[in-house]
Amino acid sequence: MTQNAHSADSTDVRGMDQAFLLRAFYIFAAVALASALIAAAGRWLGPAISLGGYSDDLTPREIVIGNNVLSVPANAIRFEEARHDGLAPRLDLYLRWPDLTGYSRAASDDFNNKDDRRDILFLSFEPQAMSRDMGGRFDPIYRSLVVEPGSAGENGLTLYDFRPDTGYLNEMLAVASQPNGEPFVARCLVAAAARDSLAPCQRDVLVGDELSLNYRFPRELLGDWRLLDAAVIAKARSFIRTEK
């Protein structure tokens, strides 16, 4: 499964100059290489969730990331060592779709991928590293990396292949218009890499106070992107006690 894409986009998009664009392409080339390595590792990373050390403890844990205080039930926190109050550089969660709840014994088959069930979403909170989220990066960055025109997908989606020279191995970009003017944008693994991953699609959005939410989801949910995106963002914001 894919991991978070990290870059040093520290300038506002409106002020992009030639030097910034050159740096951006270097950064995204590095991200593409990382994506290729992650895709290659996907065969053994997918089943690793079953070794995560589940808990059905509903006790809220208060985690501080930057200026944000998050209150999250312990059973939604993915890694055992993170199920405590205090400061953290990031927080990883897993939630079952569509109720967006954490682990329970009744839902253990879903979390253990029994019968190839793919109902689990993976959420990560970490400090904002870029001035724009994935939707805001489409025009200034992603558009120059994809093959146009794209092909029509479900529910208003346009699906783009990445150009071969970008290094995005076995990935495609899904884009759709939204009423707020910023597009919905998600990256998804394709072919064998997608089949070997529990959550081959990912998207990042800005929430809270300079906080980035990256969520990964099964490819089967991409067609319901409107419902999915609204539900995940609302759930994420419900965890943030400091959000105005």
Image (tube, grey):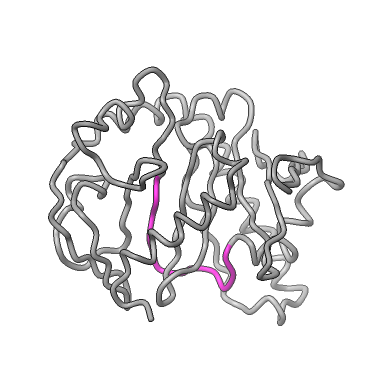
**Residue 100's x, y, as percent?**
36, 47
Look at 41% across and 73% down and name the residue there: 208
The relative height of residue 181 versus residue 14 in the rendered view (above or below) is: above
Magenta span of residues? 122-133
Look at 34% across and 65% down and name the residue there: 238
Task: Work out which residue is located at the far right of the displayed protein and give it.
Answer: 149
Residue 223, image quadrant: top right
The relative height of residue 31 versus residue 208 in the rendered view (above or below) is: above
* Quadrant of the snapshot with the C terminus: bottom left
- The residue closer to the viewer here, 31 or 62, is 62
**Residue 52's x, y, as percent?**
24, 36
Question: Total number of numbered labels?
Answer: 0
Look at 40% across and 45% down and name the residue there: 122
- The residue closer to the viewer here, 35 or 203, is 203
Residue 81 is left or right of residue 131, and the answer is: left
- The residue closer to the viewer here, 233 or 3, is 233
**Residue 82's x, y, as percent?**
20, 53
**Residue 243's x, y, as percent?**
36, 77
Task: Find out whether residue 235 is within the magenta segment.
Answer: no
Task: Find out whether residue 129 is within the magenta segment.
Answer: yes
Residue 122 is left or right of residue 178, and the answer is: left
Residue 155, image quadrant: top right
Task: Work out which residue is located at the far top of the displayed protein and give it.
Answer: 115
Look at 40% across and 41% down and name the residue there: 97
The relative height of residue 61 versus residue 223 in the rendered view (above or below) is: below
